[in-house]
Image (cartoon, rainbow, N blue to C red):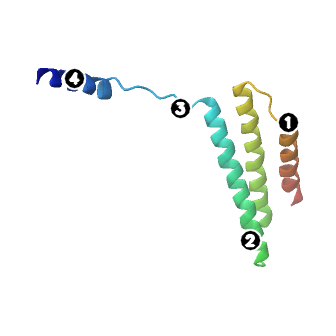
Amino acid sequence: MKIFLFKSFIVFLFTFIFPVQILANTALDIYMNDFYSKSNKASLILKEIENSLKDGSREKVCSRQREAARLGLLANKSLIKAFEVEGSNPPMEAIKASQQRWESILKEC
């Protein structure tokens, strides 16, 4: 019985008194999450614009396109920073192509 209480006390001590920190949110994770969330949001806005144009509505198309383009450009910056944090070279051709696509959407209106 004494051994059981002692072991329980040790488990309690390490579980509640000395919690272990988990370092899951590294800078790389933060930048990649930012990239994915912004690029997904930008793509969703463009999809909504496409659907509204198919329905015949042109309500706030330019302002929503500009918002999507700004988010896309910010997503690209986050992706570049993620590669810099990781210490590897980013695929600049793909990023430049994406950058040009978002800039053309931004300038289109």
Residue where numbered disc 1 is placed: 92
Residue where numbered disc 3 is placed: 24
The CA distance from mark 4 to mark 1 is 56 Å
Residue where numbered disc 4 is placed: 7
Q: Is residue 55 above or below residue 70?
A: below
Q: Residue at horizontal 85%, vertical 56%?
A: 105
**Cβ atoms at labels 1 and 2 below 8 Å apart:** no
Q: Residue at horizontal 31%, vertical 24%?
A: 14
Badge 1 amino acid: Met
For the residues carrying marks 4 and 1, which lies nearer the camera in this image?
4
Instruction: Let me know if residue 58 appears in the view.
Output: no
Say which quarter of the image contains residue 88.
Answer: top right
Mark toward the start of the polypeptide (2 vs 3): 3
**Dot 2 alpha-carbon crowd within 10 angstroms: few under 14, some 14 to 19, many 20 or more:** few
- For mark 1, give the secondary structure: helix
Badge 4 amino acid: Lys
Badge 3 amino acid: Ala
The CA distance from mark 2 to mark 3 is 38 Å
Mark toward the start of the polypeptide (1 vs 2): 2
The CA distance from mark 1 to mark 2 is 32 Å
The numbered disc on residue 63 is none
